[in-house]
Image (cartoon, coloured by chain):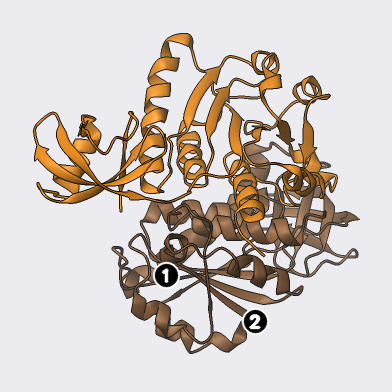
Chain colours: A brown, B orange
Amino acid sequence: MQRYFIDQNADENQRFFITDSNDIHHIVTVMRHQEGHHIIVNFKDQNVYQCEIIDIGNDAIELSLVKKIEVQTELPQEITICSGLIKADKYEWLLQKATELGASHFIATHMDRSVVKLTENKVQKKLQRWEKIIKEAAEQSYRLSIPTIDYVSNLKALYDNIEQYDYVLIAYEDAAKSGETSMLKRVISQMDNQDRVLVIFGPEGGLTEAEIQLFNHVAYQVGLGPRILRAETAPLYVLSAVSYQKELMG
Amino acid sequence: MQRYFIDQNADENQRFFITDSNDIHHIVTVMRHQEGHHIIVNFKDQNVYQCEIIDIGNDAIELSLVKKIEVQTELPQEITICSGLIKADKYEWLLQKATELGASHFIATHMDRSVVKLTENKVQKKLQRWEKIIKEAAEQSYRLSIPTIDYVSNLKALYDNIEQYDYVLIAYEDAAKSGETSMLKRVISQMDNQDRVLVIFGPEGGLTEAEIQLFNHVAYQVGLGPRILRAETAPLYVLSAVSYQKELMG
């Protein structure tokens, strides 16, 4: 069942309102809910509640909280996917699928081999579009929180703030070509719950030597198997690997 | 580097010809190769050779074999991805990404909740289009063989030939909702090299109870983590998991 986000903490004694027009459209027109129906809402504090629709207005849907739902659909680690700018449609697919697969944050940045460029005045509009895609994917896949997305003009700016991460991984083509097969597994095995992990992926043309060297002393260079994965596929491999190792038992 | 397939066994004493018009276009117009240049060719027997371009004609490019390249880019298990028919663009995206991630075979089939239908006269044309997408993805990702794709009209036909598989897995939504977290890992750990594995995924609406029950005595029902994955995302999780478990060391 589709879930909706409300950017406030849950409170069983309070009424809440859904005011996002896309959500209202989905509730009223797509799902055809009516007063008395129940929907599931994620709150800012990651609490999830079954809610009853009290009133449907044009600009707001009023809800009361009925029952708390216990669920953990977030990955144990906070994974940030940093991608060099790639073609627009491929990046949008990536954002949707990486959100389904549990990414916590996205950073888009210009890299040396990016064929796509983003001028300052277009950044805000792009971020809004990307946020909408992420929000919709998060709701559909039962995420407890909506991943954030930022644009950073270049990798140096990212490097200057690198200490906020517990692990930094660089996924690059040459690791596959040279047969590197153990680093990813080793690093994921070491990760603790709530570790903040940054994973850096190049654009269609790959990362340059200089870009890899920039993170030389802080990042692990990881191979993702022997096949060459496209820029928009590689992050999905890493997220699936983390889930498989950390969420599945046995 | 882009690779090309020749549907014959390698022979260092023989000259070979590339006759596929898409490949010729790629070699001559996109990559601008000339006589004397080298390209990499995959042969039917999974041998890979560096080849020299001897002659460029309109309908054929003549090659001689220069040097054998040792490489293993195929998954240790032969994975068949069976999908209920989903929307065309999503399925094409899935075929491309699942090929990058190592799938050996694809089966498309109509399932109860498929909103997409494929009439008999359209099947051949669709298969041709899908084969083209798969071939291009296989070449770009350095696969040693090109995955095949078939269309089967319904699941019962698939069930009647089920003994050809060493493992059958069904990935379904309710496993996520009910918290099933151990079956996938357990089964993948048991798999031997060259095992033939069928993984069945529902369409956008999911598999029905009846469809799951059909395979009750032959298939493992597997959860793919706590998040709901779309029909075109779930196969990528499974393929990544197999690669991570079986190809990465540590």
Quadrant of res B23: top left
The 10 Å Cα crowd at callout 2, few under 14, some 14 to 19, many 20 or more, is some
Which mark, residue A124?
1
Q: Residue at x 33, y 28 (%)?
A: B8
On screen, A112 above or below B39?
below
**Residue A48 in the image, given as x and y percentages of width and height:** 81, 58
Distance in Å between CA atoms under marks 2 and 1:
29 Å
Q: Chain of mark 2?
A: A
On screen, A205 above or below B178?
below
Q: Residue at x 62, y 63 (%)?
A: A103
User: What amino acid is found at the position of numbered circle 2 in the picture?
Assistant: Asp
| Quarter that holds the C terminus of chain B | bottom right
Q: What element does badge 1 sit on?
A: helix
On screen, A239 above or below B215?
below
Q: Which residue is mark 2?
A: A166
**Residue A123 in the image, given as x and y percentages of width and height:** 39, 70
**Residue B82 in the image, given as x and y percentages of width and height:** 61, 29
| Left or right position of A84 against B109 | left
**Residue B214 in the image, given as x and y percentages of width and height:** 78, 20
| Left or right position of A116 against A199 | left
* Mark in front: 2 vs 1: 2
| Left or right position of B63 against A62 | left
Outermost residue toward the top in this view:
B120
User: What amino acid is found at the position of numbered circle 1 in the picture?
Assistant: Gln
Q: Nearer the viewer, residue B81 or B89?
A: B81
First reached walking from the N terminus: tag 2 or tag 1:
1
Q: Chain of mark 1?
A: A
| Quarter that holds the N terminus of chain B | bottom left
